[in-house]
Amino acid sequence: MGVYEEKKETCGTICLKYTLFAFNFLFWLAGGVVMAVGVWTLVEKSDYISLLPSKTYAASAYILVLAGAIVMVTGVLGCCATFKEQRRLLRVYFVLLLCIFLLEVLAGVLAYIYYQQLNEELKQNLRETMIQKYKQTSYEHITSAVDKLQGEFKCCGSNSSSDWAESIWIRTSDASGRKVPDSCCKTVTPGCGVRDHPSNIYKVEGGCITKLENFILDHLKIIGAVGVGIACVQIIGMVFTCCLYRSLKAEPY
């Protein structure tokens, strides 16, 4: 009877080992996806990030990059701990899983919080950023971001093209008589901003603020969903780790 129980326990342990190994492989792949989402957000959309007054959006992306990198390392550690059947390694692995879980929940929470306050922040700051910093010395990154925003989203000004009438740059001789930046034009050519007629520039209802808000909200949903989704999967990994840990004999000291 004792032999049967020992065999049963061994089979259970082997089953747990291979289940946890499969989980760790998928977990490692998920870490790559999480890190890729974070890096993509920071690299591809860095111009738009510079237009946001709050760093919450960027912070949530940085957290995903960090969590993704740790996830990939943890996945390898988990495989080693599983096949070597070392309880100490399993303890370290469990603690790392818990830390990553908390990081990704934090990224999800930050994304949700910023989701709630984004509209008000953009209303208060985007227009001011455009008229005060566009084409100004030491704000080249803002100029590039605004031009990219207006060109990609086919819009002009924060709320409307009339916002540019108050621009510091438009009021100077450097603007060469332009009423709006050239990036507002439907067909961009040097000096095309001298005409602000609807046939020449984008007169989009709501201006760029609506377009940027929708864009950021969509990406916040992705960041939040990825963070919380992977965090939920990790709970399964922690349960498997605890089961394997308990099934192994205590290490001799």
Image (cartoon, rainbow, N blue to C red):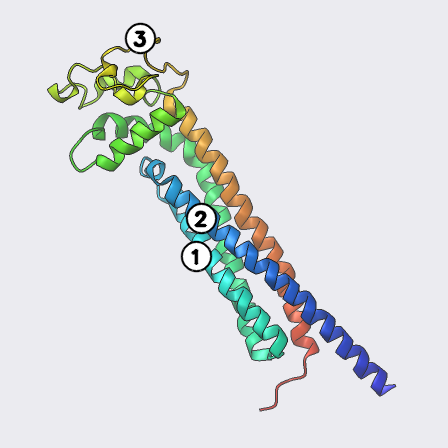
What residue did someone put label 2 on?
38
For the C terminus, the quadrant is: bottom right
Q: Is residue 222 above or below residue 9?
A: above
In this rendering, the answer to whether 190 lies above or below 40 is: above
State how far apart marks 1 and 3 are (Cα).
48 Å
State whether residue 105 appears in this view: no
Determine which residue is flagged by label 3. 197
Up-down relation of residue 102 to residue 91 (above or below): above
Asked if marks 1 and 2 touch (Cβ < 8 Å), the reply is yes
- Please state the horizontal and vertical placement of residue 133, each as a whole percent of the image: 22, 31
Q: Amino acid at mark 1?
A: Leu
- Look at the numbered discs 1 and 3 and tell me whether their residues touch, using CB distance below 8 Å: no
* Residue 249 placement: quadrant: bottom right
- The amino acid at mark 2 is Gly
Inter-mark Cα distance, 3 to 2: 40 Å
Distance between the alpha carbons at the discs numbered 1 and 2: 9 Å
Q: Residues within 10 Å of mark 3 (few under 14, many from 20)?
A: few
**Residue 66 shows which numbered tag?**
1
